[in-house]
Image (spheres, helix red, strand yellow):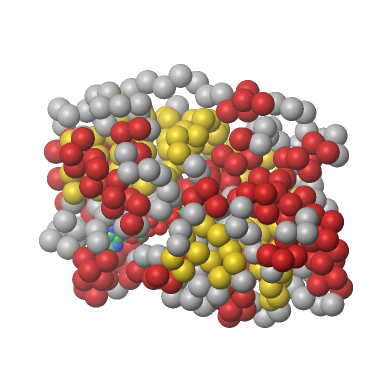
Amino acid sequence: MPLLGCIADDFTGATDLANTLVKGGMTAVQVIGVPKGPLPDADAVIVALKSRTAPVAEAVAESLAACDALLAAGAKQIFFKYCSTFDSTDAGNIGPVADALVKRLDCGFALANPAFPTNGRTVFQGHLFVGDKLLNESGMENHPLTPMRDANLVRVLGRQTDGTVKLIPLSVVEQGATILRHTMTGLKESGWRYAIVDAVTDAHLVAIGEAAADHALITGGSGIAMGLPGNFRAKGLLPDRGEAAATLPPMQGHAAVVAGSCSRATLGQIGYARDHAHTLELDVLATPDAAALAAQALDWAGGKLGDHPVVIAASAPPEKVAALQAKLGRDAAGALVEQAVATIAEGLVARGVKRLVVAGGETSGAVVSRLGVASLRIGPEIDPGVPWTYAEPTGLHLALKSGNFGARDFFLKAFGV
Ligand SMILES: Nc1ncnc2c1ncn2[C@@H]1O[C@H](COP(=O)(O)OP(=O)(O)O)[C@@H](O)[C@H]1O
Ligand SMILES: O=C(O)[C@@H](O)C(=O)COP(=O)(O)O
């Protein structure tokens, strides 16, 4: 029976959250899509949806179905995971999904906190920073699907919900878990539906997590989950599993990286790979045809596969993304590239690749679905927020890398080369 039931709005986000929980000593399994049968045996089950950019009604329906499955399996608390850069549009989907979950759980109130200080995401006075930049100046203003042009999360969430949003400032957070718990209870009793809670350090996140020990619903990034294993341990529900929680079968087979993320970190990692690995950068604008791009990539990869990773990227800088979107439309451009990358991944696996890094959240969704993965067991962390995983029933080792995560050498470091 899972202690914590999680609903993640994309696949890399799900892995990121699972990674945090495993580091806290919980076993965690990521299930792909709304579970149809019995849930795997783990302290935390994370249902990975591709709901971040889905139509609102679909995102809400799938999230509720996931919530019902987790509750039916006995989950004691529900966690709605979204991006540490609050990726969404004014139509949703963070607000509408959270609204629906608050209603389903009949809890009236939920905190909202995307902070992830280790990866540079902090929230101060309700404003989200990426490193020393406000969210809307961080590169996220150019995201192909969810451009973030406002850093004030009280305002951003306010536009997406029919409920009310209040700020809990750092001055309150710094007073610790007890004061925080009372503050949140007070807001709930006064009819506020959400609180954006400031946090700039891990200690803040742990305190917020502790204060929310008895909340039916927590919403946020993976950072806010840091305090949750301790809550279950304090209640005597979670044994101390230590590092055993992150054990995977040994790795084997050829190594490869496929990238569809156009985020700054991924573009930097591709730049590094150019000098250190066989790297193919597809020109999607010149060949806007998924099958042709895949054929080109697989032809190129032939003979290069082995222990040293090949890197195949469809990613492009903002001006090229904008040009393709102008030609095809935003959604069709994204879908074309996702199709191409998924076909490439499938072809690489058919050619003996068994260790695969996928860069990009939407991209990971497309690849994992195409490969027929049902669930991912979470293993050791490569870089903050990105662990290796073992994919059932395929027997592949996959690392699903959020666009903006990972050091510049991530594509090599993942394979220990
Ligand atoms: N060259 C390109 N032109 C237009 N869109 C692209 C290009 N390369 C990738 N994309 C699309 O951009 C989106 C990137 O989103 P995602 O994979 O979630 O990355 P991230 O994790 O960086 O947000 C995907 O839909 C992908 O198909
Ligand atoms: O919280 C995060 O930043 C990640 O877990 C995440 O969700 C990233 O999404 P993508 O950048 O779309 O991979």
Q: Quadrant of the C terminus?
A: top left
Q: Where 273 sits versus 395, above or below? A: below
Q: Residue at x 18, y 39 (%)?
A: 275
Q: Nearer the viewer, residue 83 or 342?
A: 83
Pick the front one: 4 or 190:
190
Which quadrant of the figure has residue 413? top left
**Percent x, y of residue 11:** 49, 49
Q: Residue at x 25, y 52 (%)?
A: 314
Q: Nearer the viewer, residue 78 or 215?
A: 215
Quadrant into which the N terminus falls = top right
> Quadrant of the rendered structure where residue 337 is?
bottom left
Q: Is residue 407 visible?
A: yes
**Is residue 77 shown left or right of residue 221?**
right
How many numbered dots are placed on residues in this image?
Answer: 0
* Residue drawn 45% across the image and 62% down it: 132
Pinpoint residue 254: horizontal percent, then vertical percent. 29, 26
Q: Residue at x 83, y 38 (%)?
A: 234
x and y, in percent, of residue 151 in the image: 51, 72
Examine the rendering and report whether any part of residue 394 can be seen. Answer: no
Q: Position of residue 94 (x, y in %)?
A: 58, 67
